[in-house]
Image: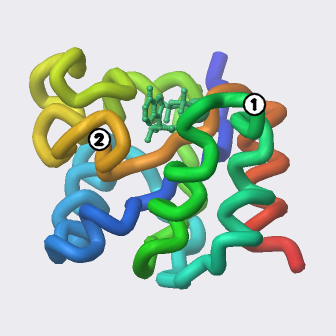
Amino acid sequence: MSNIQQTLSIIKPDAVERNLADEIKSFLIKKNFKIIDNKKIHLNKDEAAEFYKVHQSKPFYNDLCSYLSSGPIVVMILEGENAVASYRKIMGATDPKNAEKNTIRKLYGISIDKNSVHGSDSIDNAKKEIEFFFKN
Ligand code: IDP
Ligand code: MG
């Protein structure tokens, strides 16, 4: 039975800055994701803090919010079969050095903080994150 889902992807500042957005989009299209909507934006630190508030107790929270607001990002709604889990798989492990080969983070990530992309971690969070960027 088909199980079409939507998930939120972000191309983070390190990848946008290296002009990798089009290459990452092509990679996703080749992997059968449809880009339903996308836009390039530059969050301020308060907006980044709101987006990442699930991580507010983590020691790296402040750096994470500074980083996400440090430059333009590309946010995308991706659609596909089991999109939440399948995009997490193609994105790769949080730390690029632990990511499997041919994942986005292995191909493009620089470090655990500059890991090039974000992806929603559950169907519920995908809905919230899509809402955060696209429904206002
Ligand atoms: P994920 O992006 O793979 O879902 P999360 O645990 O949700 O990973 O963490 C959110 C983001 O916070 C990561 O993508 C990464 O950029 C950053 N991050 C996670 N763990 C660390 C850390 O130990 N040090 C610095 N940054 C981290
Ligand atoms: Mg996460």
Q: Provide the secondary structure element on which disc 1 rests.
A: loop
Q: Position of residue 124 (x, y in %)?
A: 83, 33
Could you tell whether 41 is left or right of 126 in the image?
A: left
Could you tell whether 112 is left or right of 36 in the image?
A: left
Q: Which residue is depicted at the point 61% across and 77% down?
A: 43
Amino acid identity at mark 1: Ser
Placement of 100 over or under 125, stated as above or below: above
In the foreground, 54 or 87: 54
Q: How is the image coloured?
A: rainbow
Q: Which mark is residue 117?
A: none
Q: Which residue is depicted at the point 39% across and 61% down?
A: 11
Foreground label between 2 and 1: 1
Q: Position of residue 87 (x, y in %)?
A: 45, 34
In the foreground, 7 or 47: 47
In the foreground, 21 or 97: 97
Q: Which quarter is ligand 2 in?
A: top right
Q: From mark 2 to mark 1, how far is it between C-alphas?
A: 35 Å
Q: Which residue is depicted at the point 43% across and 80% down?
A: 72
Q: Provide the secondary structure element on which disc 2 rests.
A: loop
**Can you tell which quarter of the image residue 4 is in?**
top right
Placement of 84 over or under 38, stated as above or below: above
Q: Which mark is residue 57?
A: 1
Query: For mark 2, what is the residue?
Result: 31
Q: Position of residue 106 (x, y in %)?
A: 16, 32
Sequence-earlier tag: 2 or 1: 2
Amino acid identity at mark 2: Lys
Q: Position of residue 108 (x, y in %)?
A: 15, 47
Placement of 102 over or under 17, stated as above or below: above
**Can you tell which quarter of the image residue 83 is in?**
top right
Task: Pick the quarter of the image with the N terminus.
Answer: top right
